[in-house]
């Protein structure tokens, strides 16, 4: 009874704070975690420290710490003293189970705005294959597990970070897949806050010599091979993400073979050696193209095979987790262009980092085959952009486009697909060589002013592009809606023709409209036919986002 009274007193004291708890108040600036993996039991045990900085405008007495619902809080301390906390379930789809184990902690003192507190934490539990968040919104389980494939297992373990599995502590408001873009917006805001976090993780496990030679992979740190001499031995590997940037802490553990190339490391199952060799050939084929555009690689791209042949690929930085199969070499090359671009070029801005990687794929497709093939490839992004614009309009109940600028957007379709088109248009406007010089001059550590890139582009092109960056980068003006209003050809002299073409833009975003000439076989032979060709986001929607027939 005495224990019950104490617990009731703690909860009662914290309840008023729970209702007003600001889960976005603290930024996690540092993680130093010792993570023990137990494949046989599918368990994870974590001990370590985290540092939280109060980035809100008011002092904070309580903090929220969230981990997967399959994990259990064991201890939370500050300055060697145990802190009172209440652990409660918190429904949110940032974890594959669809729920979090949230600890509401009474801090030892009020943390003023801008101040930090270091906590020593301990938690443990299992990470099993679980697709609850997808099945409860109606996705069949057989399909859902191909997306939510994270698990710790005896022969194969692969665990992604927040957004899939909260195996390290976070704090954010609820995000649900059933509520439009809620989940992606919540995750996007959290990732922006945590870009400068320092993450240091020591992964350890016990290896039995009779179970083969396991390989541990933990992101950009590369691949760690464990080769026990005899009996059971303890092994560990250090994985560091400092700063975290746009990456997601992940780990993969299995008995892999390693194909180590100059451009990429490929971890594969022995039976898929031929597929791994095709990947290596693809990486070697695209390396000169990536170097031409982005310079020498800062590190190797990492490709790690997923055991489920139907699993959805996952990318984090220059790391790709994917099934291996007999794929068209051209498609493999396009996929590797993306990873090698990340390995060569870094930026703290998602629209630059991701947009360039997708732009590079389109540009490489052009080199593979033709400009028409490249435009078809880029067209795959167009539908995603249009749908995102429509979703924003529906959510805001407004006919005008939302001001979702590329500088601050949390929408993947913007930071990836729309950004890729921005780079494509810049290449058309300033020329390929000028854009390559811009990328060569770019320094991630110097990109602190929103106009930094604009200044680099203008310096190389000798053009004032304020209008372009205003419409496409600093603001979201929607998409242009370009139509050929009229075209009047007339004979000038000596068999030459002058063609006057009027292009009208029904949208709110400006765009340059290149025109190209195609010749036709005709009589007389000196007659030319001119065609106006819109190369920028063809078939874009009207400003009110209602489809309009051509």
Image (spheres, rainbow, N blue to C red):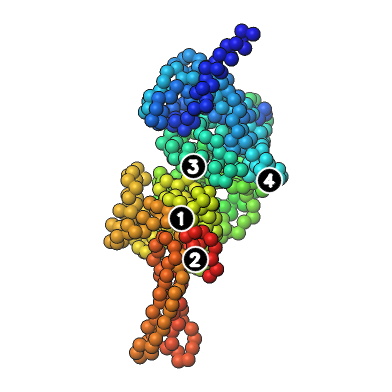
Residue 150: image x %, image y %?
A: 62, 38
Above or below, comparing residue 473 to residue 1 in the picture: below
Give the CA separation, mark 3 to mark 1.
Answer: 23 Å
In this orientation, does residue 152 appear? no
Query: Residue under circle 1?
Result: 400
- The residue lying at 44 percent from left, 65 percent from top is 506
Category of crowding for the residue at label 2, using alpha-carbon neighbours closer than 10 angstroms: few (below 14), some (14–19), many (at least 20): some
For residue 125, side relative to residue 203 (left or right): right
The numbered mark, 3 or 2, whose residue comes first in the sequence reads 3
The numbered mark, 3 or 4, whose residue comes first in the sequence reads 4
Give the number of marks. 4
- The reply to whether dot 4 and dot 2 touch (C-beta < 8 Å) is no
Query: Residue under circle 4?
Result: 139
Query: Residue under circle 2?
Result: 538
Q: Secondary structure at mark 1?
A: loop
In this orientation, does residue 405 appear? yes
Who is closer to the viewer here, 234 or 493? 493
Above or below, comparing residue 89 to residue 321 in the picture: above
Category of crowding for the residue at label 3, using alpha-carbon neighbours closer than 10 angstroms: few (below 14), some (14–19), many (at least 20): some
Query: Residue under circle 3?
Result: 188
Q: Secondary structure at mark 2?
A: loop
Give the CA separation, mark 4 to mark 2.
Answer: 33 Å
- The reply to whether dot 3 and dot 4 touch (C-beta < 8 Å) is no
The numbered mark, 4 or 1, whose residue comes first in the sequence reads 4
């Amino acid at each position: 009874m005495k224990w019950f009274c104490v617990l009731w007193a703690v909860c009662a004291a914290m309840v008023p704070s729970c209702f007003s708890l600001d889960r976005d108040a603290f930024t996690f600036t540092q993680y130093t975690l010792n993570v023990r993996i137990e494949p046989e039991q599918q368990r994870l045990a974590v001990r370590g420290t985290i540092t939280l900085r109060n980035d809100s405008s008011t002092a904070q007495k309580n903090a929220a710490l969230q981990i997967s619902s399959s994990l259990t809080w064991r201890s939370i301390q500050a300055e060697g003293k145990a802190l009172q906390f209440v652990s409660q379930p918190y429904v949110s789809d940032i974890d594959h189970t669809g729920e979090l184990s949230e600890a509401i902690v009474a801090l030892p003192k009020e943390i003023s705005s801008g101040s930090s507190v270091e906590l020593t934490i301990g938690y443990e539990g299992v990470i099993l294959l679980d697709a609850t968040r997808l099945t409860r919104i109606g996705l069949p389980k057989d399909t859902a597990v191909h997306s939510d494939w994270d698990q710790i297992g005896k022969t194969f373990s692969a665990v992604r970070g927040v957004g899939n599995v909260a195996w390290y502590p976070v704090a954010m408001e609820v995000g649900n897949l059933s509520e439009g873009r809620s989940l992606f917006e919540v995750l996007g805001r959290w990732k922006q806050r945590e870009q400068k976090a320092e993450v240091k993780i020591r992964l350890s496990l016990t290896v039995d010599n009779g179970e083969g030679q396991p390989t541990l992979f933990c992101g950009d740190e590369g691949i760690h091979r464990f080769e026990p001499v005899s009996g059971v031995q303890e092994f560990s590997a250090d994985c560091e993400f400092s700063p975290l940037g746009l990456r997601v802490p992940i780990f993969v553990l299995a008995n892999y073979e390693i194909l180590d190339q100059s451009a990429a490391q490929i971890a594969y199952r022995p039976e898929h050696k031929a597929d791994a060799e095709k990947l290596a050939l693809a990486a070697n084929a695209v390396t000169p193209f990536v170097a031409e555009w982005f310079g020498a690689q800062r590190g190797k791209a990492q490709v790690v095979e997923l055991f489920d042949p139907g699993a959805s690929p996952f990318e984090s930085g220059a790391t790709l987790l994917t099934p291996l199969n007999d794929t068209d070499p051209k498609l493999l090359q396009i996929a590797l262009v993306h990873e090698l671009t990340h390995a060569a070029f870094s930026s703290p801005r998602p629209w630059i980092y991701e947009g360039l990687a997708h732009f590079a794929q389109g540009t490489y497709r052009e080199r593979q085959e033709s400009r028409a093939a490249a435009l078809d490839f880029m067209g795959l992004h167009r539908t995603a952009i249009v749908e995102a614009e429509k979703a924003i309009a529906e959510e805001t109940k407004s006919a005008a486009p939302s001001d979702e600028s590329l500088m601050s957007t949390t929408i993947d379709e913007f930071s990836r697909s729309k950004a890729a088109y921005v780079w494509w248009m810049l290449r058309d406007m300033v020329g390929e060589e000028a854009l390559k010089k811009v990328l060569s001059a770019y320094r991630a550590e110097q990109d602190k002013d929103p106009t930094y890139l604009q200044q680099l582009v203008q310096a190389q092109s000798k053009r004032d592009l304020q209008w372009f960056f205003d419409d496409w980068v600093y603001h979201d003006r929607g998409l242009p809606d370009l139509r050929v209003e009229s075209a009047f050809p007339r004979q000038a002299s000596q068999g030459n023709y002058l063609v006057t073409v009027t292009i009208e833009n029904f949208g709110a975003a400006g765009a340059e409209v290149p025109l190209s000439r195609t010749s036709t076989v005709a009589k007389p032979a000196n007659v030319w036919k001119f065609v106006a060709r819109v190369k920028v986001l063809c078939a874009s929607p009207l400003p009110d986002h209602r489809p309009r027939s051509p």
